[in-house]
Each structure stands twice: as structure tokens, then as C-alpha cells.
Image (tube, rainbow, N blue to C red):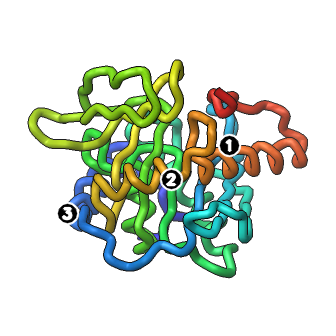
Amino acid sequence: MDPHGYEHLTPAEAIAYQNQLRQKINICELTTPIKTIAGADISFDKNSDILYAGIVVFRYPDMQVITTATAISHTSFPYISGLLAFREVPALFNAWNNLYSKPDILVLDGQGIAHERRMGIATHFGLLTGVPTIGSAKSRLYGKYIEPADKLFAESPMYDNNELVGIALRSKPRCKPIYISPGHNINMQQSVDVIKNCIRGYRIPEPTRQAHLLVNKIRIENGDNRTKQMGLFD
């Protein structure tokens, strides 16, 4: 399905489409080298139909910025927990198409398989594009875990019944953990290892932190000063 048609779906149709896509998820070892990595984020107001999408591409593992791409889109799909991909993916897809050089792997500000139907935005976008994806979320959506120790890179597995769906990772002491889950075409351990390498003194990994700064910048430049502050400087 063309993502630009998502806004015409009902919530029930969106759930049905998630269940259809779920059958194609591939959580497996990534065997090709990672030479470039990108972070993707969206900035929006829940009561607005305007979305600001941004992608920042880095060399890996030294995390030097190579290039960026942005897009401004409109959507009429409602803000519904568990279905945010249908609101955000079309804008991200436009930004993705504006990249002249695609990264080897993409980190998205949101969930991978740590989702009720295993279809967080990272998984959805990975299935759409074929790029290996990782979800790095600032809040838990799905899965139970024990709070990790208050030390750098302490981990706690997140389970849905007996299925491992993510890792709660303490990316900075005295801060809330972040929630890592593979999206598509990469496994759990690799996802965590990549995110650890992307931590540069902040709670949020550098790819999505820089993507967030980028989307807020273009949002302000376009006259919208409403920004979501999500603890990026903790």
C-alpha cells in the first residue's frame, strides 16, 4: 500500500493492515557492515495536520554527520496510540525519498516490535523501505520489565508473556531508561549494541537526538513555535 493513502484508512483498517504486514517481519542477524547510520524523527502538534519530518545521516561508528533531509507534510489520520505510524510514516517516507544517499541502518524515535501487534513505527518503516531499522523510544508502549540498575548501560529485558520484545536501557545514570527494540532486518542484541555506540553523553542516542533538533528547527523556521520537549538534554 502506498503510504500516502494511509490517511484514508479507518482505525480498524489500519489495524488489519498492521496484522497483514506483521507476517513479513524479519528479526535476524544483520550480516552486512554498518558504514552509515541515520536517525529519523517527526515534530507535530496533536491538534494540527502539519508534520515536520527529518532524517540525519552519520558515518558509523564515529558518528560524523554526512547529510540531512527534511519534509513537511499534511495528514488527516488521527493521533491514536498504537497507530502513530499511519500518521507519521508518510512524512518520513517523503524525507527518506529526499535523501540522495541512503544509510545502511535507520534508528527511529519510537517502537520496533515492542508493540501490541509488533508493528511500531520502526518495524513499519523497515517493512516499507527494506532498510534495517531500530526503534529507540523515550517511553514504554508495550512489554513488562524490571527497572534496570542506575548505572550506565544497565539493561532489563522487556517481555510480552514469554516473548522478548525489547530492552530497557539505562543510557545515562539518574535518568529514565530508553526502550530499544529491533524494527526489521536486525536482531535484538545488535540493536542494543548499535544504540550503545550512539550514546554521546545524552539520554537519547545521537541519531534521533540530532533528528529531533533538525525537525524542531524546520518547524520554527516555518512559523510554528510549538515544540515538544522530550528530555533530549538530560
Q: Are marks 2 and 3 in contact (CB under 8 Å)?
A: no
Residue with the mark numbered 3:
23
Nearer mark to the viewer, of 1 and 2: 2
* Residue at the front extreme, as displayed: 151
How many residues crowd mark 2 within 10 Å: few (<14), some (14–19), many (20+)? some
Vertical order, 167 against 20 (above or below): above
Label total for image = 3
Quarter residue 142 falls in: top left
The disc at residue 197 is 2
Q: Which amino acid type is shown beneath numbered disc 3?
A: Gln
Residue 136 as seen in the image, left or right of residue 116: right
Earlier along the polypeptide chain: callout 1 or callout 2?
1
Nearer mark to the viewer, of 2 and 3: 2
Earlier along the polypeptide chain: callout 3 or callout 1?
3
Vertical order, 157 against 181 (above or below): above
Quarter of the rendering occupied by the C terminus: top right
Q: Where is residue 125 drawn, in percent x and y?
A: 45, 61
Vertical order, 135 against 184 (above or below): above
Earlier along the polypeptide chain: callout 2 or callout 3?
3
Residues at marks 3 and 1, CA–CA distance in whole angstroms: 30 Å
Nearest the eye: 217 or 73: 217
Residue with the mark numbered 1:
43
Nearest the eye: 219 or 204: 204
Residue 13 as seen in the image, left or right of residue 22: right
- Does residue 7 appear in this view? no
Q: Residue at x 26, y 26 (%)?
A: 145
- Does residue 162 appear in this view? yes
Q: Are marks 1 and 2 in contact (CB under 8 Å)?
A: no
Q: Which amino acid type is shown beneath numbered disc 2?
A: Asn
Q: Where is residue 78 drawn, in percent x and y?
A: 52, 39
